[in-house]
Image (cartoon, rainbow, N blue to C red):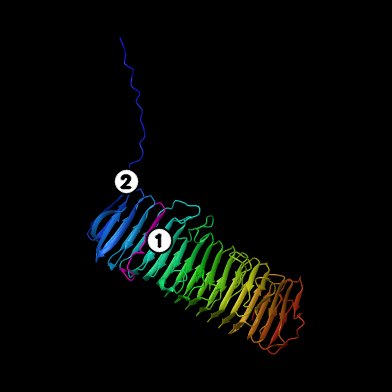
Amino acid sequence: MSHRPSANFQLEILEPRETPDATVKSVAGTLFIRGDNTPNGVVLVENAPGQFDVTVNAAFKGTFAARNINIQMGNANDTVDLAVKTALPGYLRVHLGDGNDTFTTKNSTLGAKIRGPVNIFTGKNHIIPNGIEEDIELYNIHFTGPYVAVSGVPGRGAETLDLEACFISGPLYVRNVQRLQLGKEDDNTRKVNLTSVIVDNRQHNFDTRVNPLAGPGNLVFFFSGSKVSRDFIYYGGTGRDELNLPGDPGGAVEDVYIGRNLTVYGGSGIGSLALGNGLGFGAKIGGNVTFIGGNAIDRFFLDSGSVVGGNVFVDLKGGDDQVFGDTSGLVGDPFNPVGTALVGGNLVVHLGPGNNFVGSYLQDSSLQVGGHFYIVCAGAGTTLGGDALAPGAINILNGNVTVGHRFMFRSDGINQTFNVEDPNVNKVIVVFGGGTNTVNFLVPNFFGDVYVNFGHYQGGTKSFEIDGIPTVFHGILEVLFENHGMIVP
């Protein structure tokens, strides 16, 4: 008997045959779009008031009535392009899903309105070592609803939120976004007008990677002419946080504005707040400025025509901190203040433990303080001043700084020299914790009051007026070389 050979069956895995797509439907005035887990390109264009044409991957899906728009994309790399020509009466909710996604309103008509609340979520990113993973562009729209909220995810994603030529009547809430741009660099025709802004990056740390547009760290750029009419509040994370007002690399064409208060909590990493870009344009702040740093290098700059109507309070905690100028070369070469700066109220600067630098307003630069001007240096480090290119003696009172009331420099450090070159300060107070320190008045006459306390520490050399320029003091002069206590009148 013959036997047939048995068949040898094998199971082969075929290539995927998925076709990218999204479902589109309108229910009771709300337009719903749901993407699958493949890359999708969604385009919505208002062709008549309340009517939106929808295209998915270049395939026309129909025209839908929409008072509200609700978009949920899948876990792939998606793009959503919303073009509002007149108005969206209700809410806009967009969840881009996981993946590296883009949302834009760049094709909207300038002045078109979205009248309801706006919520945009980026979803989880696919990490690109040197790239942008989420790009949100809010262009041309007048957001007249109760708020606009844009949220990334905690961690170290590279999210960019870019606002151009838009108006937001309610607060703008931003969370876990690496780069925030207000306006367009060197182009004040694309400036933005916002009411108030709160940025919360406390759970966002970008230091280990590089965004090709911005470098490492979380960054905020006010570009030429942009305005926040009320308050701007920023919370930084554990890495680098940097705010630039303005941030235009080419010099800008207009100042930037905050109507009330600017408050920055820099977090525990490297923090920088620049009022002025060193290229001729600055920040105009109607109220107070508060900058709280962390225990790493922090920097505060105030120049280029910047004006603060209220008080400035800067507390940079620990680290080797820099104010007014920069010797560290952390970003670019060392530099000194450029142009003018004005503080209507008090200017108070606290520098923590570390080797700090207090820059000087040299040559054509100047600082005017309407109230008191205090610089307090805690810890045993050494504070230097003068020219950032050759740091040395602290000479902030060099004739280019005007103080309305009294000036105080207080330091627990050692091996410091404090020079006064302005004969017209109302009252100068210098207090040291002890050690080797020097105070010189480099003018033939000084017309204000002077109080110098070299501290209670017994060691070190305490030197007063060893510069070789005899000074006649026309006000009250009190110098304490050995004092058990830190008395400040």
Give the quarter of the image for residue 153. bottom left
Q: Position of residue 456 (x, y in %)?
A: 72, 73
Q: Quadrant of the C terminus?
A: bottom right
Prevailing SS of the magenta stretch: loop
Task: Say if the magenta span includes residue 198.
Answer: no
Image point (48%, 67%), residue name: 221
Compute the Cα span from label 1 to label 2.
26 Å
137 displayed left or right of 388: left
Three-letter residue code for mark 2: Thr
Q: Which mark is residue 36?
A: none
Q: Give the x, y percent position of residue 278.
A: 56, 73
Q: Is the residue 342 above or below the residue 165 in the image?
A: below
Say which of marks 1 and 2 sits in front.
2
Q: Percent from the top left, x then y, of residue 427?
A: 64, 84
Q: Earlier in the sequence, mark 1 or mark 2?
A: 2
Q: Residue furthest top?
A: 1
**Residue 403 makes an appearance in the image:** yes
Q: Report the side of 19 relative to 295 (left or right).
A: left
State left or right for residue 417 relative to residue 314: right
Q: Which residue is mark 1?
A: 136
The answer to which quarter of the image holds residue 439 is bottom right
- Magenta range is 98-114
Identify the amino acid type marked 1: Ile
What residue did someone put label 2 on?
19
Front residue of 43/374: it is 43
- Between 313 and 251, the residue placed more toward the observer is 251
